Image (cartoon, rainbow, N blue to C red):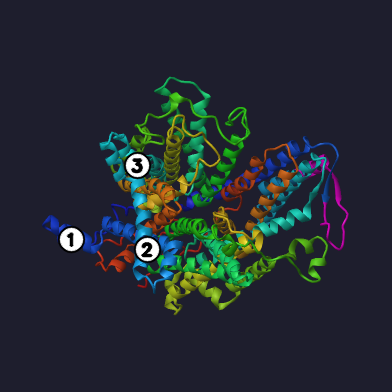
Amino acid sequence: MTALGAAARVSGNRRYLAAGVFTALGVIDIVVFGVHAQPGDAVFALSLPGNGVQIPSIHVAAAPACYLLGAISIGVGVLRAVAEPGRRGRRLTIAVAVLCFLLALLCWADAANSVGSVNLIDLLQGSVIAAIPLVLGALSGLMCERSGVINIAIEGQLITGAFAAAAISSAVASLWLGLVAGAVTGGLVGALLAVFAIKYRADQIIIGVVINVLAIGMTNYLYDRVMSPYGNIWNTGAFFTPIKVPLLSKIPIIGPILFDANLFLYITYALIILIQVGLFQTRWGLRVRAIGEHPTAADTVGIKVLWNRYRNVILGGMVAGIGGAFLTIGNVGFFSPGMSSGFGYIGLAAMIFGGWRPLGAVAAALLFGFARQLEDVLGLLSVPVPSQVLAMVPYVATIVAVAGLVGRVRPPAADGKPYVKA
Amino acid sequence: MTDRPVTTTTEPPREPPARRTSDVLIKAVTTGSPPVTTALAILLALVVGGVLIVATDPVVLRAWGSFGYAPGSAFSATWNSVAAAYSALFEGSIFSPATIGHAFQGGSVAAIFYPLSLTLFEATPLILTGLAVSVAFRAGLFNIGGTGQFIGGAIVAAWLGFGVSLPPVIHPIVCIIGALVGGGAVGWVVGELKARTGAHEVIVTIMLNYVMIYLLYYLLSTPKALQQPHQSNQIAAPVASDAVLPHVGGPPPQASLGFLLALAAAVGVAWLFSRSTTGFEFRTVGANPSAARSAGMKVERVWVLVMVLAGALAGAAAATVILSGGSPPPPLAESTYGTYGFDGITVALLGRSRPLGVVLAGLLFGALNAGGTQMAVATPVPADIVQVLEGLIVLFVAAPPLIRAFFRLRPGADADLDTGGRGWSG
């Protein structure tokens, strides 16, 4: 896409850009949060009321904590400019600077607030749950794109999955069948994408966007015409209840965050592991990556490129369909029109942000989930910053990250290019 | 979707030119030339939409339930259901036969043209956002940021519309220029980031959409910014009456000068791409950035320019929405941006990214939107069916081989050249 000269210039820029951003974050930690913090302690609760083991809340003096966090951030920035850390080191510096910023923000917000305190467990538990549809959407995109088919239709797969799960689980009064229906419907949307992208070789980005328009229109229409007038049949609002994992959920702090949610969280864990291991450790994964990078070579050694792509796109659609089912039967129960509200596009961004790798995508999705949850928590805390401005932060952060910090991520070489057998 | 570079394509072997007009026509139909496949795609979409309308109509379903006793009524119920929906769609967007009768009996003659006026009104912003997507497309960029750019234009246009007082003719012009700048600035961010850091425009535009939506919410709830004084709702003050674009008669909303603005923009874009050096550079970068760079073109500069232009066009769409649609027009609110940005993508796709195509596609979608409103009023079919029809049309248009296979047309000599994706790095 870009000549080598430009790439080298960008890489040189990035070293100082990243350092500058970290330092700027550190200065904000100190000047905005530290200086403006109310005197007194920030209190963070570390256990939920119902937990078996109650851990005492943490009290931190807000202003000094912000100064310290800011100093750490500036230190990381200087380190980034002076030393040239490796790939892992670069990621670590990003994580440290972002974490310092968020902690300083929380200290400041909590100290400003006389009533109540931030419950960190609640915040993180909510983040993990908010990340579920984003993770599943990102994994869906990844399944398709690693095999060489761009999947912009994640949004459409989510909304149809959500609709089908709500409708079927209501109609037959079985949540499990609703889950299956969500997955199957997502798979069908994936099959539609696959047919147009692979058989008719249409532009995949175009097809993805069009499928989204179609899926949202279709679910809106069916909601108005069928689901809403006959809500007692098609939209009863049942949902999966949380399951505490025996033993694991008893672990302080980690237990309630990671092991006290409904079925969908555990399905998500399973899919993350399955796809990460499958993609990099199995024959299936090797083939998928081969047809995504160099389909001609893969074809030469006897891998059925088109068949493998069909399978991957349909499986990817099913993963997103499960993510859609989460929105209804895993979360609020009822279907409402347009409820996927851009999650598919954020999942897509998380996938690209994570460099087309499952674990990277999960990390990015968690960041978005955390940001959403933080917006809600800070909204309750009556922070002297408009909630709309805070709501912008994750999206601005993504732009900054994509522009400067993560560096150029490389898509699979054959991503989006239809394969024609020579 | 994109032009192949003029200098590098090898011309496909042409069939001998047809001699008579009728031969040309027959050939166009049997081989499925773009206009023919588009028409067939619309037909097919209407058929599928009709099936959807029938399948969800309780009256029809009941009639089919008693098919054994009264087979005739099942068919007539089916026909009635589809016919009522589609004729309401037509009457809401093109013309309603009843208005002619009224005109003869002393009713308003202008009422005959009212549905058409609604169509033009709906089409105006769609044409402009469609152009915003299509200019980026032709330079190889995928602009999903129509929403953010639209909001950028809307904020500036609305503020200039009520915040400053200017003489009548100057005021709307200033508002439109402001909207171009507001939208262009949002587009510029995308182009500049891509040029300087290689940040992918798809992510940046998606993220900027959210940033702009929250910025709009913030400004609308801040009394010193856009919020109407003494108002707790998130709504801006209405624009001054002298800033409203002149419009043709009839009850609001009506087609306004904005439609001519959209046409002018289409002509301008057409000229830019087919006649100017800059446009040639845009197309070359779109077809092959490496080749463009080898030829000495500044690819990064082109990206920035194209995104500024795309943003300005989306901003212009916002100006037409803010400055027309009633007297005073509905003020800027949290829902004003609607789906204009994303509709622009479908309009651009249906119009094959050509200015004339975008105008026609915008008119078609404008007609569907206008008719959909009427259909929802006159029949039990919800207006959302229009979105389904629009999606189906573009889906079928995007895959000419499907249409040809369905209608059993012969493949044309060069009809398939434009299909085939180019991936993220196109």
Q: Where in the figure is residue A206, as x and y percent of width and height?
A: 42, 57
Q: Are marks 2 and 3 on the same chain?
A: yes
Who's the residue at 68% across and 59% down the image? A129
Q: Are marks 2 and 3 in contact (CB under 8 Å)?
A: no
Distance from label 1 to label 3 (Cα)?
Answer: 34 Å
Type of amino acid under label 3: Pro
Can you see residue B293?
A: no
Q: Chain of mark 1?
A: B
Q: Earlier in the sequence, mark 2 or mark 3?
A: 2
- Estimate the spatial distance between the alpha carbons at disc 2 and disc 3, rounded to whole Å: 27 Å
Residue A366 lies in what quarter of the image? bottom right
Position of residue B149 measured from the top left corner of the image (x, y, whole percent): 49, 41
Q: Callout 1: helix, strand or loop?
A: helix
Q: Which residues are magenta?
A: A45-70
Same subunit, tags 1 and 3: yes
Q: Which residue is mark 2?
A: B78
Using the image, tell me which numbered label, if any, was put on residue B26. Answer: 1
